Image: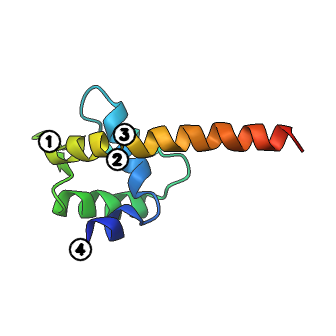
């Protein structure tokens, strides 16, 4: 599976972001609660895909966390996050001008 194919799937980036935001591994139910309206089946599928890609993994007690590769991915996405903030500020300024 190509990385961009995986990252482009609905909810994938949200799952990665929520795993990144947690200071410790998180259980499935708690992770789902943080992912708003995501269904259990979609979350399960995304976690399986992320595990198979080496981006997320499970602890011995079954909780989920990012792997070192997943942490590297979040770091690599930093410039995109910076760009998105600039874009949002630009759009907000454009919307106020109209």
Q: Nearer the viewer, mark 3 or mark 1?
A: 3
Depth check: give the residue in front, 92 or 19: 92
For marks 3 and 1, give the CA distance: 16 Å
Q: Is residue 42 left or right of residue 24?
A: right
Q: Is residue 42 above or below residue 81?
A: below
Image coords of residue 12 (percent x, y): 39, 57
What residue is disc 2 on? Answer: 16
Callout 4 secondary element: loop
What residue is disc 1 on? Answer: 68
Can residue 34 be seen by looking at this rendering?
Answer: no
Q: Is residue 32 left or right of residue 63?
A: right
Q: Which mark is residue 78?
A: 3
For marks 1 and 4, give the CA distance: 19 Å
Give whichever of discs 3 and 1 has the lower sequence position: 1
Mark 2 closeness class: few <14, some 14–19, many ≥20 residues within 10 Å: many
| Image-quadrant location for residue 24 | top left
């Amino acid at each position: 599976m190509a990385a961009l194919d995986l990252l482009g799937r609905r909810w994938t980036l949200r799952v990665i972001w929520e795993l990144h935001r947690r200071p410790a591994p998180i259980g499935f139910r708690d992770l789902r609660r943080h992912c708003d309206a995501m269904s259990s089946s979609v979350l399960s599928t995304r976690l399986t895909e992320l595990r198979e890609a080496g981006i997320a993994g499970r602890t011995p007690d079954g909780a989920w966390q990012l792997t070192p590769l997943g942490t590297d991915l979040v770091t690599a996405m930093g410039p995109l996050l910076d760009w998105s903030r600039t874009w949002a500020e630009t759009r907000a300024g454009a919307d106020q001008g109209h």
